[in-house]
Amino acid sequence: MELPGTLRINERGQLELGGIEVTALAAVFGTPLYLYDEALIRDNCRKFCQAFRVKEGWSQVLYAGKAFLTTAMCRIVHSEGLGLDVVSGGEIYTAIEAGFPASKIYFHGNNKTYEEICLALEAGVGHFVVDNFMELETLSRLSAERGKKTPVLLRITPGIEAHTHRYIQTGQEGSKFGFPLAQALAAARRAKELPGIEYRGLHCHLGSQIMEINPYQQTLSLLMDLARAIKGNTGLVTQQLNLGGGFGIRYTPEDRPPSPALWGETLLACLEEESRKNKLPRPLLLVEPGRAIIGPAGHTAYRVGTIKEVPGGRKYVAVDGGMADNIRPALYQAKYMAVLANKAALPPSEEVTIVGKCCETGDVLIENIALPPVEPGDILVVLNTGAYSYSMASNYNRLPRPAGVLVNQGRAFLILKREDYKDLLRQDLIPPHLALK
């Protein structure tokens, strides 16, 4: 099995991350435990910036915060020169508290609230990605009241379906996101008319975990045709073209995602050709990798508990986490690989199904995986869980959310405290009539 980043099997047959045995990390920080490989996070950031020629002024890479966002993560991506894509007031607040420059933040979302828009304007968020006419009108009014002219990108639904799970498609016709292509010119005209609005360009997002480049090429061509039509009808020049994110990663051996280098080379060549064809100045290309940066750089360590065999030959291995800390397998049948950290060098000898401890039949992390002989107390590491595990974690069954540790060059830093039972009650209130007598 190919291990990502600084994961390796050492001479003792133990799984290491960043020079530290995972069993040692589990002993110190407990399980379930989110593990983050700082060296690989930084390497992925650099590969995207290099591939899209950021230093030469061709592109800007924005980290998609919804994949995984903490104050520490904000510090890392900022230090690597990335901007930030956010979708809520909470993500804006996290970034600002981390010291991330607001001017490098792009604010997305199909239902930005009045309070969120005000927060973003007062923080000085650099760009709004406008989803609909109502938002455009509200943003105009609130910007004008503050004497501001807010830069906007118009989110367009291009009508292109990428081959991925239907729950994570966003560019197809009928999507809840963005202006349908038929409304795009009207949106641009309205953006030109409204006070407090400065048109900067176009945005789209096709979906997530996409393995094919062709849908992005089609979308880029379509958006450049639209940019030509907008200029011809309104005089507005599209200075930025944002293709969103969705770049797939390798969860299983069958996954074959393009490299950042191939994404960059192909899309920049397409942009150059389309700009020339449409007789337009080449816009700044923006991309928003999230999963592709943090996904392979994060892993989850569990401790094995109950093991049981049921009629029919299936063997269940239950771990001390599950769908509360990683909803993706239950939500859209996401597939993962795993390693027994304390038996990493042993050959697989049995097929088991890894299940969580939540009170749901669907709490299955991995079906039918070959592992060495599994025993209670073993440390199981599910690989490539960095994206959307913590972001989508819950307290279902009143389970505290796990701790998170950033590992680098033999050192481990706690970046997410483990919740305890007191944290579960922090928001609870008891009405007076339920007071104990």
Image (tube, rainbow, N blue to C red):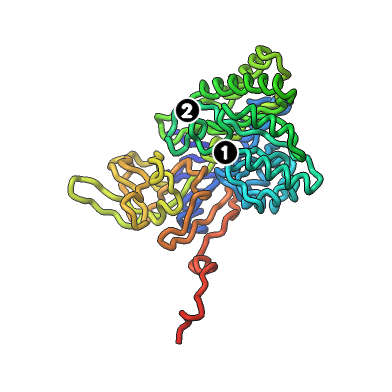
Nearer the observer: mark 1 or 2; the answer is 2
Front residue of this view, candidates 170 and 372: 170
Quarter of image, res 102: top right
* Residue 42 on image: x %, y %: 63, 38
Quarter of image, res 106: top right
Mark positioned earlier in the residue sequence (1 or 2): 2
* Marking on residue 290: 1
* Residue 207 on image: x %, y %: 51, 34
Residue carrying label 2: 161
The crowding category of the residue bearing disc 2, from other C-alpha atoms within 10 Å (few below 14, some 14 to 19, many at least 20), is some
Helix, strand or loop for disc 2: loop
**Residue 266 vertical position relative to residue 305 in the rendered view, above or below:** above
Front residue of this view, candidates 379 and 150: 150
Helix, strand or loop for disc 1: loop
* Residue 210 on image: x %, y %: 49, 30
**Residue 320 vertical position relative to residue 371 in the rendered view, above or below:** below
Q: CA distance from mark 1 to mark 2?
A: 20 Å
> Which quadrant of the rendered structure holds the C terminus?
bottom left
Amino acid type for the residue under numbered disc 2:
Glu
x 67%, y 14%: residue: 278
* Marking on residue 317: none
Q: Is residue 109 left or right of residue 198?
A: left
